[in-house]
């Protein structure tokens, strides 16, 4: 018996690709010493495939700084795995004594309403972050 790929024999074969989601990170640091604030802006989609990468990148960006603003206004989709990643980020930053907040867009806000009804993930508005000074 010979096993042959159907696609290689078919005149109507099509290429199939699995769309992968991507994230883009931008990091800005202001202040000096104990007053350093880092803003991490994320755009794209946070899902099961990249939630661990998302959490790791945010934790690395926060390293050694006094405060972190996580701007998720450009995230257009967040799976429940993203909420788990935010809890992991929160636990890590609490151990490192880094104050932080999330500025959520509509996609992230919907997930946080469902997954964080107690408000354990610190949320801020765009206006409050613009007016804030590093601690």
Image (cartoon, rainbow, N blue to C red):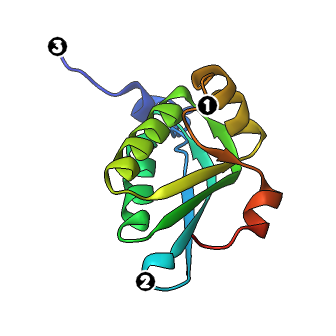
Q: Which numbered disc, 3 or 2, marks the residue that appears first in the sequence? A: 3
Q: CA distance from mark 1 to mark 2?
A: 30 Å
Give the secondary structure at mark 2: helix
Residue 41, horizontal then vertical, whole percent = 62, 62
Relative to residue 112, is residue 83 drawn left or right? left
- Tell me the quarter of the picture where residue 135 sits: bottom right
Give the label, 1 or 3, closer to the camera. Answer: 1
Disc nearer the start of the sequence (1/2) = 2
Which numbered circle lies on residue 6? none
Q: Position of residue 120 (x, y in %)?
A: 54, 33
**Mark 3 closeness class: few <14, some 14–19, many ≥20 residues within 10 Å:** few
User: What kind of element bears circle 3?
Assistant: loop
Instruction: Indicate the quadrant where residue 7 lies.
Output: top left
Q: Residue furthest right?
A: 127
Q: Quick one: label 1, few (<14), some, or many (20+) residues within 10 Å?
A: few
Residue 119, numbered label? 1
């Amino acid at each position: 018996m010979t096993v042959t790929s159907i696609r290689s024999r078919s005149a109507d074969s099509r290429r199939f690709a699995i769309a992968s989601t991507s994230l883009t990170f931008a990091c800005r640091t202001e202040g000096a010493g104990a007053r350093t604030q880092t803003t991490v802006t994320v755009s794209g989609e946070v899902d099961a495939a990249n939630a661990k990468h998302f959490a790791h990148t945010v934790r690395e960006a926060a390293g050694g700084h006094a405060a972190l603003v996580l701007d998720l206004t450009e995230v257009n989709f967040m799976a429940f795995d993203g909420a788990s990643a935010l809890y992991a980020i929160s636990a890590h930053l609490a151990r490192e004594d880094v104050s932080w907040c999330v500025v959520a867009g509509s996609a992230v806000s919907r997930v946080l309403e469902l997954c964080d009804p107690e408000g354990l993930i610190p949320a801020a508005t765009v206006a409050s972050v613009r007016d804030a000074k590093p601690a």
